[in-house]
Amino acid sequence: MSQSPINVRRKPRQSRAKFTQQALLDSAVQLLAEKHHGEITVREMTEIAGVGLGTFYEYFSQKEDVFALIIHQQIKVLAQELLEHGAHLRTTQPDILITDYVKQLIHIQLKKIQNAQQIWATIFLLERQLSTSEVYQKHYALMCQLWQDLLQPFAIANLGRTAINLHRVIYGFVMQTLLVEPDFSEWTHLETDIGIACNAFLKS
């Protein structure tokens, strides 16, 4: 499939318009948890969202634009939740070791993905198919900056490099695992392996 940028025809500004667009996104997420993305139709999205076909095309050119926006939205939500968890850990456990801190953040991130495993397996697949290199780089930079922000309070050496390597490890392990095995179940083993690899970079 050729890569194309997200084409949102109408950027919602009023609360009702934002609600309508979000309803379409939520309907697509619901369908992605139930069936292959190729089987999903625009009509199904609109029926679940409770809007007409014409309304869909006010906001999107095609269903792939919905999927692309879902990818962007899910990544931003995950990043924000990790930032909040990081702040909570530092507040409630001010003497926490960086290795324990990162271990808990990895656990939280993997749990979020595991709890919506089918959707994330599809997101990783669609990201490869739909995202332009510019969009992919934007998401990559967002997650690398996230880890830099999460690690910054510990004043470690080579902060930027360490943050990039943590993202490389976590993203690479999880993405490749779910691409190969969407119904993967050995999450405890995967978390252990990711922790071992991340600890090597934290100690370097």
Image (tube, rainbow, N blue to C red):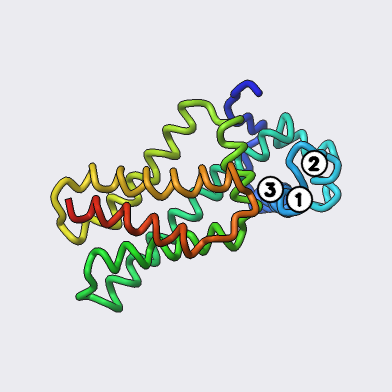
Q: CA distance from mark 3 to mark 2?
A: 13 Å
Q: Residue at x 29, y 53 (%)?
A: 149
Front-lying residue, 58 or 39: 39
Q: CA distance from mark 2 to mark 1?
A: 7 Å
Q: Residue at x 51, y 44 (%)?
A: 175
Looking at numbered disc 3 in the image, what kind of residue is underneath it? Leu
Can residue 155 be seen in the rendering of this structure? yes
Where is mark 2, residue-wise?
A: 40
Where is mark 3, residue-wise?
A: 25
Mark seen at residue 12 = none
- Residue furthest out toward the top: 2
Image: 128 above or below 112 = above
The residue mark sitting in front, 3 or 2, is 2
Q: Which quadrant is the N terminus positioned in? A: top right
The residue mark sitting in front, 3 or 1, is 1
The kind of secondary structure element at disc 2 is loop
Residue 8, image x, y percentages: 64, 33
Q: Quadrant of residue 151?
A: bottom left
Mark seen at residue 31 = 1
Residue 54, image x, y percentages: 83, 36
Looking at numbered disc 1 in the image, what kind of residue is underneath it? Leu
Front-lying residue, 146 or 8: 146
- Residue furthest out toward the bottom: 92
Can residue 20 be seen in the rendering of this structure? no
Front-lying residue, 184 or 57: 184
Q: CA distance from mark 3 to mark 1?
A: 10 Å
Image: 17 above or below 152 = above
Image: 99 above or below 54 = below
Residue 174, image x, y percentages: 49, 49
